[in-house]
Image: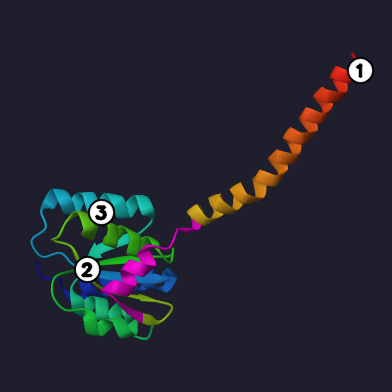
Amino acid sequence: MSLNLEDKKAVVAEISAEVAKAQTIVVAEYRGIGVANMTLLRKQARESGVFLRVLKNTLARRAVQDTPFAGLADHMVGPLVYGISEDPVAAAKVLNGFAKKDDKIVVKAGSYEGKVLDAAQVAELASIPSREELLSKLLYVMKAPVSSFARGLAALAEKKQGEAA
C-alpha cells in the first residue's frame, strides 16, 4: 500500500516525536515471521513500553536524520521492525528476547547514546537489568538492615518482658 505525501509526512512526524523521546532504537529483520508471532511481539513490546513499528526505511531514515540516531541509517535496509524506547534497555530486551525464541526475528543493529551498536552489543545491552529491577534490588538492600534492626528490637523487647515476668 503506497502512502501519499501527506500520509508520509504524518508518519515521519509521528516517528520523529517518538525518536525525540527515545534513548534506544533497535532494528531487527522480520523476514518470514507469522502473523501470530508478530502479534505476540507487538504485545510484549506494548507491555514493556516499547514503540514497535514496521516502517518504510526511507521514512525511518528521515525521522532519525539530525538526531543522535542518525548513524543507524546505514543499517536500515531490508524488511525491518523498529523498536524505540525511552527506557535504555527495554527495546533491546524485547527484540533480543523474542529473537531467541523465534529465529525469523534477527536483530541487525541498535543505537544508544549516539553510538551505533551491532547485534552482539544489542545483546549485551539487553542483558543489563531494567530500571525497575535495579530499583527493587536497591530497595531490598536498603530494607534489609532496617528489618534486621526491627527484629533485633522485637527480640530484645520479648527478652525484657520475659525477665520482668
Query: Which residue is found at the position 43% from the left and 65% from the top?
Result: 86
Which image quarter: residue 113? bottom left
Region of the chain picked out in magenta, as a range:
116-131
Tell whether 144 sits left or right of 93: right
Q: Are marks 2 and 3 in contact (CB under 8 Å)?
A: no
Q: Which residue in the structure is indicated by mark 1?
A: 164
**Type of residue at label 1?**
Ala
Label located before the other in sequence (3 or 1) = 3
The crowding category of the residue bearing disc 1, from other C-alpha atoms within 10 Å (few below 14, some 14 to 19, many at least 20), is few
Q: Quadrant of the C terminus?
A: top right
The crowding category of the residue bearing disc 2, from other C-alpha atoms within 10 Å (few below 14, some 14 to 19, many at least 20), is many
Q: How is the image coloured?
A: rainbow
Query: Which residue is found at the position 16% from the left and 51% from the top?
Result: 37
Query: Which residue is found at the position 70% from the left and 46% from the top?
Result: 145
Question: Which numbered marker is on residue 28?
Answer: 2
Label located before the other in sequence (2 or 3) = 2
Q: CA distance from mark 2 to mark 3?
A: 13 Å
Q: CA distance from mark 3 to mark 1?
A: 65 Å
Q: Is 117 situated above or below 34?
A: below
Q: Mark 1: which secondary structure? A: helix
Which image quarter: residue 120? bottom left
Query: Which residue is found at the position 16% from the left and 79% from the top?
Result: 77
Which image quarter: residue 3? bottom left
Residue extending farthest to the top is: 165
Seen from the viewer's position, the closer of residues 62 and 41 is 41
- Is residue 24 a member of the stretch shown in magenta? no
Residue 118 visible? yes
- Is residue 130 a member of the stretch shown in magenta? yes
Label located before the other in sequence (1 or 2) = 2
Residue extending farthest to the right is: 164
State the image coordinates of residue 21 (x, y, percent, origin top left): 43, 69
